[in-house]
C-alpha cells in the first residue's frame, strides 16, 4: 500500500506520443460507445431465443422489458454488453440472466477501459500544456 498513488498521479508512459494517443482515443471511443436501444433489443432478442423462458413475450411486454434493460445499461458500452451476453451463454446457467449478472461478467474490463480513458484525458492535457 505504501507505493499506491491516485490514478491522476500515476506516471504516463515515456513512449506515449500524440499519434499513439490519437489511436488509443479512437479505440477507446469505439470500445466505450454506448449501446443503442436497437442494439440492446437485438441482443435481448438473441437471449430470448437462447432461453425459452423469454421466448413467448408479447410485443407490448417485450417493449417494456427492453426499456427496463435499457435503463440498466444506459451509457454502457455495446462491446461489453455483447461480451457479457457471450460469456453468460458459456455458463452452465439454464435461465435468462439478470442485468447484474451480465455487468459482473465484464466489470474488470469496464473498469480498465474507464481507467484508460481517464489516463488518456491526462495525457491529452499533458500534450496540450507541452504544445505538442
Image (cartoon, helix red, strand yellow):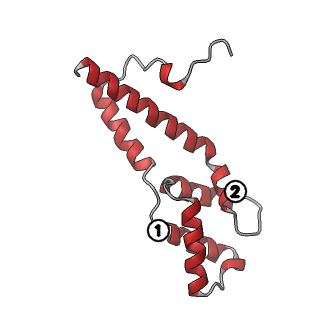
Q: Position of residue 127 (x, y in %)?
A: 29, 23
Q: Position of residue 114 (x, y in %)?
A: 50, 39
Q: Return the residue found at the far left.
A: 131
Total marks shown come to: 2
| Element marked by disc 2 | helix
Count residues near mark 1 (Cα–Cα under 10 Å), then give few for <14, some for 14-19, many for 20+. Answer: some
Q: Earlier in the sequence, mark 2 or mark 1?
A: 1
Say which residue appears at 68% left-offset and 16% top-offset: 1
Say which residue appears at 56% left-offset and 86% top-offset: 59
The residue identified by callout 2 is: 101
Quarter assignment of residue 45: bottom right
The residue identified by callout 1 is: 37
Q: Position of residue 124 (x, y in %)?
A: 33, 29
Tell me: residue 114, above or below residue 82.
Answer: above
Say which residue appears at 56% left-offset and 72% top-offset: 66
Q: Position of residue 101 (x, y in %)?
A: 69, 56
Quadrant position of the C terminus in the picture: top left
Tell me: residue 3, above or below residue 92.
Answer: above
Tell me: residue 107, above or below residue 2.
Answer: below
| Element marked by disc 1 | helix
Q: Is residue 91 left or right of residue 6?
A: right
Q: Is residue 6 left or right of residue 91?
A: left
Residues at marks 2 and 1 touching, judged by CB atoms closer than 8 Å: no
Nearest the camera: 92 or 10?
Answer: 10
Quarter assignment of residue 36: bottom left
Q: Is residue 124 left or right of residue 109?
A: left
Nearest the camera: 6 or 28?
Answer: 6
Amino acid at each position: 500500500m505504501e507505493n499506491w498513488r491516485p490514478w491522476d498521479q500515476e506516471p504516463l508512459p515515456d513512449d506515449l506520443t500524440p499519434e499513439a494517443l490519437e489511436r488509443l482515443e479512437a479505440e477507446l471511443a469505439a470500445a466505450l460507445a454506448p449501446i443503442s436501444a436497437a442494439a440492446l433489443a437485438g441482443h435481448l432478442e438473441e437471449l430470448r431465443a437462447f432461453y425459452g423462458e423469454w421466448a413467448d413475450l408479447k410485443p407490448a411486454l417485450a417493449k417494456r422489458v427492453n426499456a427496463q434493460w435499457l435503463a440498466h445499461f444506459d451509457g454502457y458500452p455495446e462491446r461489453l454488453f455483447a461480451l457479457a451476453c457471450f460469456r453468460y451463454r458459456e455458463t452452465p446457467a439454464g435461465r435468462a440472466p439478470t442485468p447484474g449478472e451480465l455487468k459482473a461478467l465484464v466489470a474488470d474490463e469496464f473498469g480498465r477501459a474507464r481507467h484508460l480513458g481517464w489516463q488518456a484525458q491526462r495525457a491529452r492535457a499533458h500534450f496540450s500544456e507541452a504544445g505538442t
